[in-house]
Image: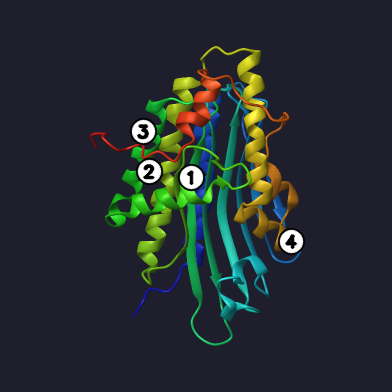
């Protein structure tokens, strides 16, 4: 008999993950800490938003836990599952975005989530999703390789080719079609994940969730004290515009949150505090700014030729 989904175990894990990530990032910053904002959703459920602002290292960061529910599935969740239309549902997850001060420290995003619906007839239907991706402004091969090496290690217990599959999925998902360019250097992305083995599926989500901070913290510490000037800061704000465009136009989590009547402050906490758009800006050939799009944002296979 298949193991039944353990909703409480998933919730307890997600809350512990939120706490662990906030503790690690606050220790890196040294000056600022995460404020805690608990909230209730009138339609059902609620969450805890944890936000850090104006720190020594992090200009703005948010690590959000939510557990929401409803009587009828939102349209964004039934597009590929018409048989679940009208079914009661629950969704929970941890979603985060970190925007550093220093342009040499990349922005990072991570999300792990669990969804379960109970149709009028049949057993509950669940699935997991999540992943993480890295958005540098000034790229370093060492950082990209380490990021992907950690991602691959997180996937290793779950079958040969899992990292490669999720890596490609990430490259395809975090792509700005209207700009014809990737948002960053990728990482992992998976959705609608249900093998029929709840324990294994939950284990995959935990492995991905736990490995995020192990992938990101070393990069932050390596770059956060690098000197920079007005030119680098201006370029960082310009490139942040791509982040905003993706989140508001394409991101499934943002669209689901807004469609399901989620808390707007928590949904949009991923947006950076400062950003700029320049008309038809083209970086000068041969510069580090040009190298970002010419070399780093090209969907590269970062672990090719790397000794594992």
Q: Residues within 10 Å of mark 4 (few under 14, many from 20)?
A: some
What residue sits 27% from the left and 34% below the top? 306
Q: In terms of sequence position, does the residue under pointer 1 or pointer 4 come before the other?
A: 1
**x, y (%) of residue 211?**
40, 43
Vertically, is 69 above or below 59?
Answer: below
Q: Residues within 10 Å of mark 2 (few under 14, many from 20)?
A: many
Q: Residues within 10 Å of mark 3 (few under 14, many from 20)?
A: some
What residue sits 37% from the left and 57% below the top? 203
Q: Which residue is disc 3 drawn over?
A: 145
The residues tagged by marks 2 and 4 sit, at their Cα atoms, a distance apart of 33 Å
Q: Quadrant of residue 116?
A: bottom right
Q: Which residue is disc 1 drawn over?
A: 132
Q: In terms of sequence position, does the residue under pointer 2 or pointer 1 come before the other?
A: 1
**x, y (%) of residue 117?**
56, 74
Please report contact status of discs 1 and 4: CB closer than 8 Å, yes or no. no
Q: In terms of sequence position, does the residue under pointer 3 or pointer 1 come before the other?
A: 1
Vertically, is 151 above or below 92?
Answer: above
Vertically, is 302 above or below 139?
Answer: below
SS for dot 3: helix
Q: Which residue is disc 2 drawn over?
A: 151
Q: How is the image coloured?
A: rainbow
Please report contact status of discs 2 and 1: CB closer than 8 Å, yes or no. yes
């Amino acid at each position: 008999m298949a193991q039944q989904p353990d909703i409480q175990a998933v919730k307890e894990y997600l809350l512990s993950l939120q706490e662990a990530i906030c503790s690690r990032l606050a220790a890196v910053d040294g000056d600022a800490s995460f404020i805690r904002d608990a909230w209730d959703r009138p339609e059902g459920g609620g969450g805890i938003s944890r936000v850090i602002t104006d720190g020594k290292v992090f200009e703005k960061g948010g690590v959000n836990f939510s557990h929401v529910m409803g009587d009828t599935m939102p349209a964004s969740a039934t597009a590929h599952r018409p048989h679940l239309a009208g079914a009661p549902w629950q969704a929970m997850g941890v979603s985060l975005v970190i925007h550093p001060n220093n342009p040499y420290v990349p922005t990072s995003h991570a999300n792990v989530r669990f969804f379960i619906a109970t149709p009028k007839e049949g057993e509950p239907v669940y699935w997991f999703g999540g992943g993480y991706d890295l958005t540098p402004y000034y790229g370093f091969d060492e950082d990209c390789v380490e990021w992907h090496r950690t991602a691959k290690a997180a996937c290793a217990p779950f079958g040969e080719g899992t990292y490669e599959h999720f890596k490609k999925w990430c490259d395809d998902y975090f792509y700005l079609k209207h700009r014809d360019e990737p948002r960053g250097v990728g990482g992992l992305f998976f959705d609608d994940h249900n093998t029929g083995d709840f324990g294994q599926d939950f284990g995959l989500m935990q492995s991905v969730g736990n490995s995020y901070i192990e992938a990101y913290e070393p990069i932050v510490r390596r770059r956060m004290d690098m000197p920079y000037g007005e030119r680098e800061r201006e370029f960082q704000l310009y490139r942040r515009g791509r982040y905003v465009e993706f989140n508001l136009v394409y991101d499934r989590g943002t669209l689901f949150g807004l469609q399901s009547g989620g808390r707007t402050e928590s949904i949009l906490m991923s947006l950076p505090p400062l950003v700029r758009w320049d008309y038809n800006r083209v970086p000068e050939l041969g510069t580090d700014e040009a190298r970002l799009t010419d070399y780093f944002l090209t969907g590269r296979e970062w672990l090719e030729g790397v000794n594992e």
